[in-house]
Amino acid sequence: MAEDYYIGASDAPGRPMFVAFWADQLHLFPQPSGVYTLKVRAYRNPNDWITSGGTVDGPDGFDLPLVYYAVSHIYRAQEAPQMAAEYERAFNDGVAFLRRDIMKPESYSPVVLSSGGRKHRWGSLEF
């Protein structure tokens, strides 16, 4: 988004409004003029789902859906398709709910661009 909408006609430092991730580096636009607290929402792939230490690299909220996933496979191995389907449904519902909760923005306000325009969450620009 930053590289598409940031009008970098002047590289004057200011309060960062956009962030981009290129070549394993974080870029802020415009260049910060001081020290600021920023909130960044992102996602990443887990480092280790199979662990000998017992700690899965993921949000705690996914613990129960992972149990449902394992139980559904146990029932499937015991040839109990109805119970397997029920636990698989519980797993899918739990993951969908948690994904929605994790990805929910704190605010639905449009982004105000440095040029005075606005970038709405549904993709339209307004000047």
Image (cartoon, helix red, strand yellow):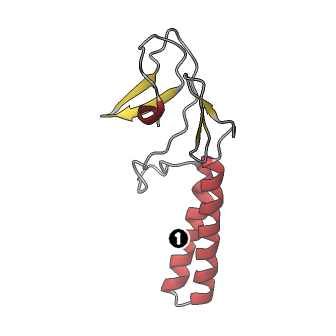
Residue positioned 33% across, 34% down in the render = 24
User: Residue 69, relative to residue 19: is it above or below?
Assistant: below
What secondary structure is found at the residue carrying circle 1? helix
Q: 113 or 56, which lies in front? A: 113
Residue 82: x and y, percent? 62, 88
Q: 83 or 30, which lies in front? A: 30
The residue sitting at the left extreme is 23
User: Residue 78, relative to residue 39: is it above or below?
Assistant: below
User: Residue 54, relative to residue 85: is it above or below?
Assistant: above
Query: Left or right of 55: which side holds 84?
Result: right
The residue sitting at the front extreme is 127
Residue 50: x and y, percent? 41, 57
Q: Quadrant of the C terminus?
A: top right
Residue 73: x and y, percent? 51, 77
Residue 68: x and y, percent? 59, 69
Residue positioned 57% across, 24% down in the render = 38
Q: 66 or 28, which lies in front? A: 28
Amino acid under disc 1:
Ala
Res 95 quadrant in image: bottom right
Q: Residues within 10 Å of mark 1 (few under 14, many from 20)?
A: some
Q: How many marks?
A: 1
Residue positioned 58% across, 82% down in the render = 84
Question: Which residue is tagged 1?
Answer: 70
